[in-house]
Amino acid sequence: GDSVTQMEGPVTLSEEACLTINCTYTATGYPSLFWYVQYPGEGLQLLLKATKADDKGSNKGFEATYRKETTSFHLEKGSVQVSDSAVYFCALSPSYSSASKIIFGSGTRLSIRP
Amino acid sequence: NAGVTQTPKFQVLKTGQSMTLQCAQDMNHEYMSWYRQDPGMGLRLIHYSVGAGITDQGEVPNGYNVSRSTTEDFPLRLLSAAPSQTSVYFCASSYQGANEQYFGPGTRLTVT
């Protein structure tokens, strides 16, 4: 079945460091891909999305490119801030699904040191 | 526009007790769903609904019941709580087929 695999955390970086969180997926057809972020004590929020191959999603300095050839959707940011500390979830919505089903990865906790 | 609201925020139950987690949305979304979040396992879909009167099972439905009598409300019922149901529960909603889901703030449930 469809699934999402993302790098295990926690990831700890210093402020202004570069960030990459790896995400790969297994799916039939052409799923939509997402990154959600969960700040401490809150629910998940959509960070960015891409709906077809080679699309780049971007928001708040974060970017991810839909790579069909490598079935990947890695999250990147050039210079992280303390406020980026959160748990990040990679997710997909299957192309065959008529409902808004989303399959989530296990999450990566990111901590940024001042 | 309150978005997706959930009550209560925290709950402690004893094994065998029953309770209902409430979820409401004011965005007129057709699709609503319940997830549980456990450490290292991401979010797992419990039940979902594509409209009033229509519900279906997700990945981990055992021990939970749902109903959808209105577009706005989607309560989750635990009939006989078990320690394995200790988790954080999130409700989400979206327009049908819109992909992006809006999440509530969560309910942290502990079963002793």
Image (cartoon, grey):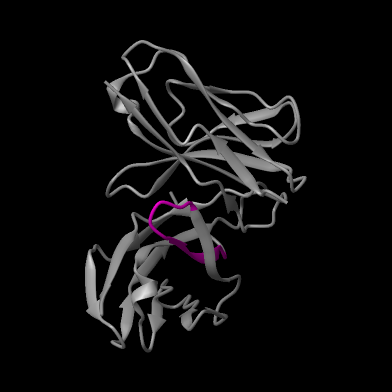
Can residue B68 be spotted in the picture?
yes
Q: Position of residue A23 (x, y in %)?
A: 36, 68
Measuring 46% from the left and 36% from the top, which residue is drawn there? B9
Tell how many labels.
0
Q: Position of residue B7 (x, y in %)?
A: 54, 33
Viewer-nearest residue: A95 or B74: B74
Indicate left or right for B26 with A21 as reference: right
Q: Which residues are magenta?
A: A30-43
- Quadrant housing the C terminus of chain B: top left
Say if A84 sits above or below B90 in the image: below
Does residue A39 show up magenta in the picture? yes
Seen in the picture, residue A27 relative to B80 is either above or below; the reply is: below
- Rendered view: A103 above or below A80: above
Task: Say whether residue B61 is left or right of residue B100.
Answer: left
Closer-to-camera residue (B68/A2): B68
Dividing the picture into quadrants, the one containing residue A5 is bottom left
Residue sticking out furthest to the top: B16
- Give the residue at x 46% y 14%: B79
- Identity of the residue drawn at 32% across and 28% down: B110
Q: Residue furthest front?
A: A114
> Which residue occupies 47% across, 81% down?
A63
Which of these two is toward me, B109 or B98?
A: B109
Tell me, yes or no, whether the highlighted magenta stretch contains residue B45. Answer: no
Residue B78 appears anywhere in the view: no
- Residue B105: where, in percent of width, then height? 50, 46
Res. A51 image quadrant: bottom right
- Is residue A2 found left or right of A55 in the rendered image? left
Estimate the x, y position of residue A54 in percent, counting from the top left.
54, 82
> For this rendering, which residue is in front, A83 or B18?
A83
Q: Is residue B53 above or below residue B100?
A: above
